Each structure stands twice: as C-alpha cells, then as structure tokens.
Image: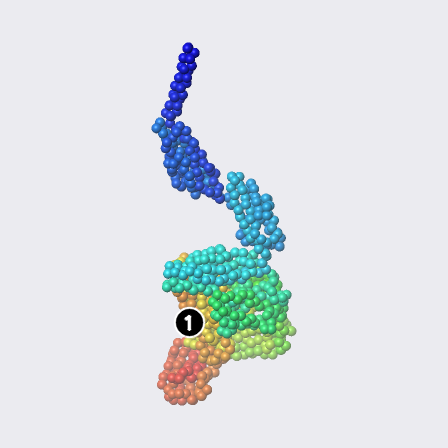
C-alpha cells in the first residue's frame, strides 16, 4: 500500500510541474526573429523579396518596416513581394506582440541591392582589321563564359560574326555584352534612307525611317528636325506638330562618314508627306586601275557636276565624290559634265551614260557610279581666300581653301599670302613656315589628286577710321603652279606683272616687271599698257622689257583711283591680265570705291585676290557681286566676265542658331554648269535643285546671337559662276538669296544686278548706239566750254541726261526735237561724265564726256 501511494504522489507532482511550465511559457512576451529568401539582390535578378517570421512565444501581431522597399510596411506574418528599386543597403525592422508584451528586432543593412555590374566590349559594331581584334571583358570578374565556350578574360577574333560574353562577379551577379564584327569596308558609307508615313491622326503622325546606306556603316545618327535625335539604325518617330522638318542621317564606318537629308511635312489637317532628298545616287571616283570599281585607295572626286535629262536637273559631288538627284517618276539619262581636260571617263563607256527609271515616289536607284582615269598626269592646284567684311580697328578672319583638281600629286606644296599694307598678321591654324613683312608662306605638304584642305588667317586691321571707304585686298598664290600642257609655240617665255604705289602723295607709280629669265624670257616685241582714272581710259603706251628687267611709269596723282593694265605677249599661258591700282593718292578730293567694279587679275585657279571696301556699318544679311560693274546706275560688265557672289549672314536673334540654309535662285543668264564653290565661314553641304537653285546647308553650325558674341555671329559663303554665252548688250543679270535660320521665315537679301555693256566703249570716248537706225556724233570731246551732239534717226522727242562719275544726275534736257544739241559747260567742274539719250521707245545712245 505504501508503495502505490508513493507512485501516485510522484505522478501528480510531475503533472503539476508540467502544467506550471506550460502556463509559464504562455505568459511570456514574444521574441522577434525573421529571415528572407534574398538578402543580396543582383540587378539582373528579381528584386522582389519574401520575408518569413521566426519569432517565438506565439506573437499574434506583426509590424514590419522596409526602408527603401515598396511597400514600405506590412502587418502580415510573412510578407511577400517587397520590391527594392534603389541601389544600396537597407534595414529591416520587425515588431511582434502578444498579450504579455512585444519585441523589436532591427537587422541593420540586412538587404543589399547591388548596382549592376557592367561588361563593355566597346562599340556594338566593330570592323575586322587586317590583324585580329582583341575583345576584352575586363579584370573585375571571377569567371567568364564566351559564346564559343572560351573561359578567358579576353578573346582573339579573326573572323567576322557575332560574339557574346557572360561574366560573374564575387557576389554571384552576372552580366552580358555582345558585339558584331563586320568585314573591313573598302569605302566610307554612302548614306541613304527611305521613309514612310506609317500612321496619321489629327494628334500626330508616325513616320517610319529605314536605313538604306551602303558600304557597311557601323553607326548611325538621326536628327528629325524637331529636337529629337537617335542612334538606332532604323527608327519610328512621332511628329506632334505641323511644319516642315529636315531629316538628317549620318552614317559612319571606320573610313569616314556621309550625310544625307530628307523632308517630312505635317499639315494641320493631319496630312503627312515624307521624301528623301535624292532617290538617285552614286559617286564619281578616280579609277586608277581602270577596273570600274572604287577600290580602297581610290578617292572620290568632289565638285563634279552631273546632268539628268529630261529636265535638265543637276547634282554636284560632295567631298568624297557622292551625289544624289531627287527625280519625279519617269525615265532619265544620267551623265557627267566635262570639267577638266586632265581626266577622261573610263566607266561607263559605249554609251557613257546610264538610263534609269523611277516608277513610284519610294523608288531608289543607287550605285550609278562613274569612274574617271587620268588623260594627262599633272597636278592642278586651286586656291580660294575670303572673309565676310573688313572693318577698321577689328580683326578679320580669312578662310583659305585649296584642292588638287589634277591627276597626280603635288609635292612640297605651299600657299603664299600677301596681306594689304593696312593689315597686320595675328595668328593662323595653318602651317606658317616663313614670314617676310606682309608676305606669309604656308606649307601644305603633299596634296594628292582630289585632296582638299583649309585653314584660317587672322589679320588685324589698322585702327584708322579714315580707312572707311578705301579698298583692301589680300592675295593667295598656291605652288606648284606649273603648266599641265605644252606652251603655245608663239610665246616668247616672258611673263609680265604690275605693282603700283603712291609716291609722295603726288604720283601713282607703277612698276612693270618681266619675270621671265634673262635671254630666254626677253620680250620679242612691244606690248600695250593703259592708264585709267576712275576706270576711264586716259593714256595708252607701249613697252618692251628683257627678262628680269622692269620699267617704272608714273602718273600725276589727283585723288582719283589710278589703274595700270599691261598686256602679256601673244601665246602667254593661262588667263593673266596684269594690273594694279593706286587709291587715295594726291588731290584734296579723293575718289574711292573704284577697285571692286572691275575684275581682278585672278582668273587662273592658282591665284585668288579678295578685295573689300572697308566699312563701318553693314547690312547683317546681304549679297554682293564682284565685279560690281561700271557706273553706279547700271553696273556695266562685259559679257565675258566671271561673276563672283558672296552671301553674308548674321544671327541677330536672341538665341544660338543651330542650322542655317541659304537658297539662291540663279539668273537665267548664268551658266550653272560652271559653278565653282568657294570659301566659307563654316562647313556646308551644297545641293542643286531643279536646273538653277543652289542650296547651302550649314548643319549644327551653333552660330551665337550678336548680343552674346558679335564677332562670331557672322558667316558667309562665296562662289563663282560664268555667264551664259550670247548675253547681249543691255541684258540685266539680277540675283538675291534667302537665308533661313532654324525654323524661322527666310530673310531675303538685297538684289544685286549687273548690265551687259560695251566696256571698251564705256571706258573710252566711243559712242554706244543701241539702235541700228541711229547715228550720233559728238564733238569736241574732251571739251572746255561746250560740245555738240548731232543725232540722226531718232524718234522725237527725246531726252538727254548727264551723270557724274559717282552716278549723280547733273543735267537733264527733255522734249528735244532738233537734230543738233549743244551742251554748255556752265558750272560743270573738270572731270568725267556719262550721258544717255533715250526716247519713249527706250535707250538710244550712251557714252562719256570729258570736261577739261
């Protein structure tokens, strides 16, 4: 019995202890604890984290805090899908509670959201070089896996194709990169694209742009004209406002780049029109091996003109020999225009043109290529120089450009620049190899066929306001300037030049040089020289000089501009017309503005003379022509003169101008096939539209406004062009241009004009007759007190008008019916005057009177 009681007592005691322990556990506050499925998050992994509660003592509520996470808090026991989107380390806080209390656990820096690891193999598209390309993934990783199973840091690539690598860092994070290796291109790209209005609504238009560039471009840059750009090869782009947008595509590879343009027009009604600037394209190149394929070492030929007929339409090659036409539907013949006797066309031949067909607006015809080969091996260097204006006390920046239009290289080439006496050399980005006073010599090294280059010269203008109105000239001469053809057998090998100077403010003295060699360059006969005052002939003489000798001729200075012209001997090569001017010499009343009215002696391509009348004020956007022409009323020129036009522009707005377009519709009396692009202030692209419209595009020019930077707010472009043959006396050649700054309305320049006249008659005393039925006799001329006009065959009544040399009308007589007209000197001072006689049917006669 005692034994059983003891056993029961022991069992009861155990039960009491167990119940007591259990009740004690239920009476305790919880202890917080937790874990997460991710504590280090790689950028490429899912950034959602799930948390699991591990708290003890039976909590019945949970309050989670997730700084840096989304959501940032939770009250569920095991929260899922907490999202971290900011790189860094973050705390996690858990508060658990029950009836007996609560507990808080903060795990500091528990979540570590790692920034992405980056592996970069370089450009996404590379070009296979003659040697292997080494792709290097970088040394910051613990393992590498290439697409060909290689596990090294770098990979040697000897074949074109696609190559990828996956890298892993010490945290176990991975990243990948791929490149495409292309074959080595043989040419710079020929940029081209098509565009299509894909979707059109009242709210906007979606346009699809598809790259069609050839010659293996490796990168692309699009500018859609609305402030948006892209580096994708092909692009869908929305236009949300009406307007006219210029589309630019630059395609590039290791050998260079090419730019092409298109246009998108969005109408307010929702209409969308898209077209590329040229649907027919190709190139002209130096086909040195005559295989009709442009090989790697064969350069494109720039500034070459092409013709498309019917039309006619013209195109000009760019700096790498590429061209494009924009043609409507139809069948066309595409051919080159002959421009240089040193070259002949090698491809195509028999026939020497292409026939192409355009059947829809989206048709493109490419690779219409022309190969030229050397007919005569010879360098043919050309030079240009110009600035936008010359003002006293300021600095003028002259642009110098050159090109070898020949068929062989020019070795040790130099450009000699002679500054005006009122200029001082300041600086240049060219290779100045010597300076002798105002004579600067720049070395340009070897210039290969079709190679061009440019540099700038900064010249300080003398700080003397009395220079305003005078003319300053600068001359550039490129060497070698040797002949590319056999000299005329009649030439005696003499060569004449003229240099003028004012002596003692009383005499205009000119030195006529024979730069030929002594003996072999002696003049074999006499040549004529002529002296002009204010461009009117006042004296004629002759000279004959041995090689190496010179002759000085002085003329009494009276304030007029004195010019001496001297003739070369028969057969002299080239287009030299030796002359020089002396301005502002002698007299109390000095005549200015007489130098720029006649051509300079720079018709040979290897010489360029740039003359400007010094100004104090100016029209910021204007156009001027050289030569200006004789007389201020008619601007007379000869029908053989080459015209040189300069278009100047200035940003007078309130912000930077990014893109500038100049459009110039040529006069029908100018021959567009003779266009010669000249220097400019900024790089441009020249296009020809239809048969007579020139367009210069200055892309990304970043021209500051004049309020911020006045000196750099200016720009200009210059070109030369010949007249059409057969321009008759009285023909008026007019020209003006429109300048577009970004998206603004065009700024129209002034209209410049010239009148075709008989220059020999204008500068001499000859009478000019404009009607075959009329005869006019003037005597005496020059005269002192009066002169008489005898006029036959004139419809009466007629009008007599007399003008000073400056173009001011000084006498007019109307309703004349007599055949004889006496003009009295009265108060007319000594000088040269121009008259004209006209009736209701037009101009009858014109000429010059000299009062002496």
Asked if residue 659 shows in the view, the reply is: no
The residue sitting at 47% across, 40% down in the picture is 41
Q: Secondary structure at mark 1?
A: loop
Q: Nearer the viewer, residue 587 or 490?
A: 490
Left or right, 282 with respect to 112, comes to right
User: On screen, 396 above or below 525?
Assistant: above
Q: Residue furthest top?
A: 2
Report the number of discs.
1
Q: Position of residue 676 (x, y in %)?
A: 52, 69
Which corner quadrant holds the N terminus? top left
The residue carrying mark 1 is: 751
Q: Position of residue 10 (x, y in %)?
A: 42, 15
Left or right, 692 with respect to 347, comes to left
The residue sitting at 43% across, 38% down in the picture is 50
Q: Residue furthest right?
A: 519
Q: Position of residue 263 (x, y in %)?
A: 45, 63
Q: Position of residue 51 (x, y in %)?
A: 43, 36
Q: Residue furthest front?
A: 1
**Image quarter for residue 245?**
bottom left
The residue sitting at 40% across, 89% down in the picture is 819
User: On screen, 299 above or below 589?
Assistant: above
Which corner quadrant holds the C terminus? bottom left
**Image quarter for residue 350?**
bottom right
User: On screen, 631 above or below 795?
Assistant: above
Q: Nearer the viewer, residue 579 or 63?
A: 63
Asked if residue 257 shows in the view, the reply is: yes
Mark 1 surroundings within 10 Å by alpha-carbon count, few (fewer than 14), some (14 through 19), many (20 or more) = few
């Amino acid at each position: 019995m005692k034994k059983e009681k003891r056993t029961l007592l022991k069992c009861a005691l155990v039960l009491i202890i167990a119940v007591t322990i259990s009740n004690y556990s239920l009476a305790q506050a919880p202890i917080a604890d937790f874990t997460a499925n991710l504590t280090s998050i790689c950028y490429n992994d899912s950034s959602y984290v799930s948390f699991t509660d591990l708290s003890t003592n039976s909590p019945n509520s949970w309050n989670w805090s997730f700084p840096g996470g989304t959501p940032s808090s939770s009250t569920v026991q095991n929260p899922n899908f907490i999202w971290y989107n900011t790189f860094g380390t973050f705390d996690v806080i858990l508060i658990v509670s029950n009836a007996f209390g609560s507990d808080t656990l903060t795990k500091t820096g528990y979540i570590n959201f790692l920034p992405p690891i980056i592996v970069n193999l370089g450009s996404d598209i590379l070009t296979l070089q003659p040697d292997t390309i080494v792709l290097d993934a970088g040394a910051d990783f613990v393992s590498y896996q290439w697409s060909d199973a290689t596990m090294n840091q770098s990979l040697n690539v000897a074949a074109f194709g696609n190559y990828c690598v996956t890298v892993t860092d010490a945290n176990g994070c991975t990243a990948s990169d791929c490149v495409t290796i292309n074959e080595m291109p043989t040419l710079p790209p020929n940029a081209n694209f098509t565009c299509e209005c894909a979707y059109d609504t009242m709210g906007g238009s979606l346009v699809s742009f598809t790259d069609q560039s050839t010659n293996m471009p490796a990168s692309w840059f699009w500018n859609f004209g609305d402030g948006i750009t892209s580096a994708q090869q092909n692009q869908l782009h929305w236009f949300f406002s009406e307007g006219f947008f210029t589309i630019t595509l630059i395609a590039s590879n290791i050998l260079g780049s090419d730019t092409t343009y298109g246009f998108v027009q969005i109408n307010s009604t929702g209409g969308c029109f898209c077209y590329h600037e040229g649907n027919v394209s190709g190139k002209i190149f130096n086909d040195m091996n005559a295989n009709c394929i442009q090989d790697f070492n064969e350069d494109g030929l720039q500034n070459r003109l092409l013709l498309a007929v019917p039309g006619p339409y013209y195109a000009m090659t760019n700096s790498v020999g590429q061209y494009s036409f924009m043609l409507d539907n139809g069948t066309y013949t595409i051919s080159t225009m002959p421009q240089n006797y040193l070259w002949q066309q090698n491809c195509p031949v028999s026939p020497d043109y292409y026939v192409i067909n355009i059947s829809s607006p989206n048709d493109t015809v490419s690779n219409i290529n022309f190969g030229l080969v050397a007919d005569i091996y010879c360098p043919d260097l050309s030079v240009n120089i110009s600035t936008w204006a010359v003002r006293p006390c300021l600095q003028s920046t002259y642009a110098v450009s050159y090109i070898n239009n020949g068929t062989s290289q020019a070795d040790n080439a130099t450009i000699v620049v002679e500054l005006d006496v009122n200029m001082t050399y300041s600086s240049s980005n060219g290779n100045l190899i010597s300076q002798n006073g105002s004579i600067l010599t720049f070395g340009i090294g070897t210039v290969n066929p079709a190679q061009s280059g440019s540099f700038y010269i900064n010249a300080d203008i003398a700080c003397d306001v009395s220079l305003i109105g005078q003319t300053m000239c600068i001359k550039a001469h490129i060497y070698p300037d040797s002949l590319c053809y056999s000299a005329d057998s009649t030439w005696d090998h003499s060569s004449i030049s003229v240099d003028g100077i004012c002596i003692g403010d009383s005499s205009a003295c000119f030195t006529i040089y024979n730069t030929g060699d002594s003996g072999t360059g002696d003049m074999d006969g006499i040549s004529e020289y002529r002296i002009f005052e204010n461009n009117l002939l006042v004296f004629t003489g002759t000279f004959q000089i041995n090689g190496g000798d010179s002759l000085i001729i002085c003329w009494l200075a009276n304030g007029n501009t004195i010019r001496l012209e001297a003739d070369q001997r028969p057969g002299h090569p080239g287009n030299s017309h030796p002359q020089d001017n002396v301005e502002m010499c002698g007299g109390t009343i000095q005549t200015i503005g007489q130098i720029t009215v006649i051509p300079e002696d720079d018709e040979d391509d290897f010489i360029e003379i740039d003359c400007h009348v010094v100004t104090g004020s100016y029209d910021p956007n204007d156009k001027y022509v050289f030569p200006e022409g004789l007389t201020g009323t008619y601007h007379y020129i000869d029908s053989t003169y080459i015209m040189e036009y300069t278009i100047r522009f200035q940003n007078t707005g309130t912000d930077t101008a990014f893109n500038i377009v100049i459009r110039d519709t040529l006069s029908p009396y100018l021959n567009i096939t003779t266009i010669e692009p000249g220097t400019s202030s900024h790089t441009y692209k020249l296009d020809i539209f239809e048969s007579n419209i020139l367009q210069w595009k200055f892309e990304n020019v970043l021209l500051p406004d004049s309020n911020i930077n006045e000196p750099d707010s200016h720009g200009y472009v210059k070109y030369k062009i010949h007249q059409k043959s057969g321009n008759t006396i009285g023909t008026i050649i007019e020209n003006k241009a429109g300048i577009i700054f970004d998206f603004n309305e065009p700024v129209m320049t002034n209209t410049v004009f010239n009148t075709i006249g008989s220059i020999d008659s204008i500068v001499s005393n000859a009478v000019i007759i404009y009607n075959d039925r009329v005869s006019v006799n003037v005597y005496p001329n020059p005269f002192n007190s009066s002169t008489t006009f005898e006029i036959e065959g004139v419809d009466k009544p007629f009008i007599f008008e007399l003008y000073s040399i400056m173009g001011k009308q000084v006498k007019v007589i109307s309703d004349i019916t007599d055949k004889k007209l006496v003009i009295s000197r009265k108060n007319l001072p000594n000088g040269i005057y121009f008259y004209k006689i006209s009736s209701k049917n037009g101009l009858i006669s014109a000429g010059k009177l000299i009062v002496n």
